[in-house]
Image: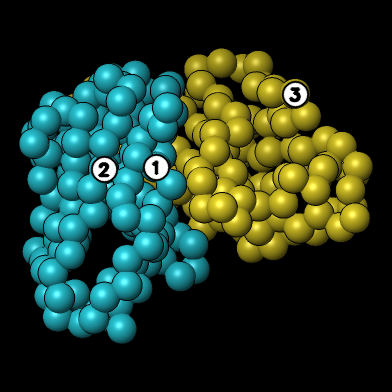
Amino acid sequence: DTAVSQTPKYLVTQMGNDKSIKCEQNLGHDTMYWYKQDSKKFLKIMFSYNNKELIINETVPNRFSPKSPDKAHLNLHINSLELGDSAVYFCASSRQGAYNSPLHFGNGTRLTVT
Amino acid sequence: AQTVTQSQPEMSVQEAETVTLSCTYDTSESDYYLFWYKQPPSRQMILVIRQEAYKQQNATENRFSVNFQKAAKSFSLKISDSQLGDAAMYFCAYRSAGYSGGGADGLTFGKGTHLIIQP
């Protein structure tokens, strides 16, 4: 049973297209996140949601729009894809208020924009 | 804002030897949590070990242990009896224990250390 699952695992698309990445967690967590890992492996938070409410929205182009239909899902939609959007995107979840609790990560989606 | 620094982009160790990965962080908070994550080539993010800042005792998990120096803001990871399966990127991460947003601020990561195990 996968705790945090992302689909697709790989995504190859052309510049200008719109794409979505889906994320689901079955851990009963209240908080979900999107992280971006660049080509140098640096992990940076993009968004976080707590009980479907947007909490963190880092300096991310507004072409990126997260959507949380319920506590267990946090999808990422990207409009007008650019070459610089190529990266690995990780979804993660954690228990609300449990600061000593680690984040549980999905296996990542490698996005390649050509 | 908190920052996490891993000053060793790459480390190499012989199998069965011991290696220490460095991590320092900058924060004005007194209560926080620190983590080490491992990312093998499979891309999975795997929790290795965690440390609560209010605990003086260093955390240990089997062959993995930390040296937590709160005053120096240092949190190094020691891997004993290194095994081939330990080869991976290792990330140090900081989590605030602040109560705004219910912990939704997530983790702040260092840039990682690539650990190579020589057979």
Residue at 26% over, 36% down: A24
Picture quadrant of residue B75: top right
Q: Which residue position is annotated with label 1?
A: A106
Q: Nearer the viewer, residue A5 or A44?
A: A5
Pinpoint residue A67: horizontal percent, then vertical percent: 10, 45
Q: Are marks 1 and 3 in contact (CB under 8 Å)?
A: no
Amino acid carrying mark 1 in the image: Gly
Do the residues indicated by labels 3 and 2 lie within the same chain of the protein?
no
The Cα–Cα distance between marks 1 and 3, rounded to whole angstroms, is: 25 Å
**Residue B97 visible in the shown view:** no
Q: Which mark is residue A23?
A: 2
Q: Look at the image and tell me in which quarter the N terminus of chain A lies.
A: top left
Q: Are marks 1 and 2 in contact (CB under 8 Å)?
A: yes
Q: Nearer the viewer, residue B5 or A113?
A: A113
Mark earlier in primary sequence (1, 2): 2
Amino acid carrying mark 2 in the image: Cys
Q: Look at the image and tell me in which quarter the C terminus of chain A lies.
A: bottom left
The Cα–Cα distance between marks 1 and 2, rounded to whole angstroms, is: 8 Å
From this view, report whether residue A22 is shown above or below residue B51.
below
Do the residues indicated by labels 1 and 3 lie within the same chain of the protein?
no
From this view, report whether residue A38 is shown above or below residue B63.
below
The chain holding disc 2 is A
Residue at 27% over, 20% down: A28
Q: Which residue position is annotated with label 3?
A: B62
Pinpoint residue A62: horizontal percent, then vertical percent: 9, 64
Local crowd size for mark 1, using a 10 Å CA cut-off: few (<14), some (14–19), many (≥20)? many
Q: Colour of chain B?
A: yellow
Amino acid carrying mark 3 in the image: Asn
* Residue B23 as seen in the image, left or right of residue A26: right
